[in-house]
Amino acid sequence: MLPRVSVLIIEDHELLAQSLGVALQAEGLAVEVAQLAGGADLLEQAAASRPAVVLLDLDLGDGREGGEALVPGLVALGAVVVVVSGASDPLRLGTCLELGAAAVLPKTRGFEDVLDAVLKAAAGERVMPDHDRQALLADMRRRRGQEQARVAPFERLTAREREVLGHLMGGRSAEAIAGIFVVSEATVRTQVRGVLTKLGVTSQLAAVAEAHRLGWRPSDT
């Protein structure tokens, strides 16, 4: 008989969570599904149940912060965290490993793989092959470097240039921005040129598109 391992499932798709829970219970595991309704504190639930293993999704819905933010707290409680997610972004998945998760598994993997990961985690065995882990971390570092290189030009903007770009993102014209700042339109156009030069683009549209693509906001730098 399999050891009585306690597992906490943190997953916003209730049917999937319940189905996985039933399947794991059928294998002799003690399973609890975290309650996400009403903004319930997930770390408090984990602290109350003290699971040996946590199966964690990253996209928890209802405006919640990404599941990766839970990893350090869950690890601090002594849980082995296995991320089982539909997310494919190596930045997010690699960050989970950096924060202490034992493994990441795509939701496309079969139930047997999930069960095997749970049992290995509970037994203190390596859940994720080291070469897979190192490959994901290397991919994460490459992507992180690329994103930092893209964001760097925005960090060179002056405070007023950031404000100008923010207004451009809001669809305001140079004339409208001049009215807001109570300066001449020529002054604003000079500031716009400064923004374009520092971002390495040739049009306001391109500057706004790049800012939106990176999720940049005037307060980010």
Image (cartoon, rainbow, N blue to C red):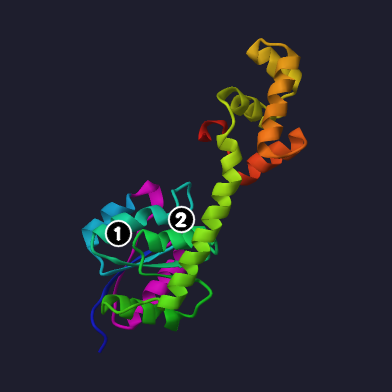
- Residue 79 lies, with reference to residue 180, above or below; the image says below
Name the amino acid, label 2. Answer: Leu
The mark total stands at: 2
The residue tagged 1 is: 74
State the residue at coordinates (60%, 28%).
162
Which of these two is toward me, 40 or 169?
169
Asked if residue 19 is among those painted magenta in the image, a careful observer would answer: yes
Which of these two is toward me, 118 or 178?
178
Q: Residue furthest bottom?
A: 1
The residue tagged 2 is: 60
State the SS at label 1: helix
Figure quadrant of residue 31: bottom left
Of the residues under marks 2 and 1, which one precedes in the sequence? 2
**Dot 1, how many residues are within 10 Å of its Cα: few (below 14), some (14-19), or many (20+)?**
many
State the residue at coordinates (64%, 14%).
181
- Residue 41 lies, with reference to residue 160, above or below; the image says below
Which of these two is toward me, 36 or 213?
213
Query: Horizontally, is 198 left or right of 60 in the view?
Result: right
Which of these two is toward me, 32 or 149?
149
| The residue stretch that appears in magenta | 11-40
Query: Horizontally, is 151 left or right of 55 in the view?
Result: right
Figure quadrant of residue 102: bottom left
Q: Position of residue 105 (x, y in %)?
A: 46, 72
Q: Is residue 215 visible?
A: no
Q: Position of residue 160 (x, y in %)?
A: 59, 22
**Dot 2, how many residues are within 10 Å of its Cα: few (below 14), some (14-19), or many (20+)?**
some
For discs 2 and 1, the disc positioned in front in the rendered view: 1
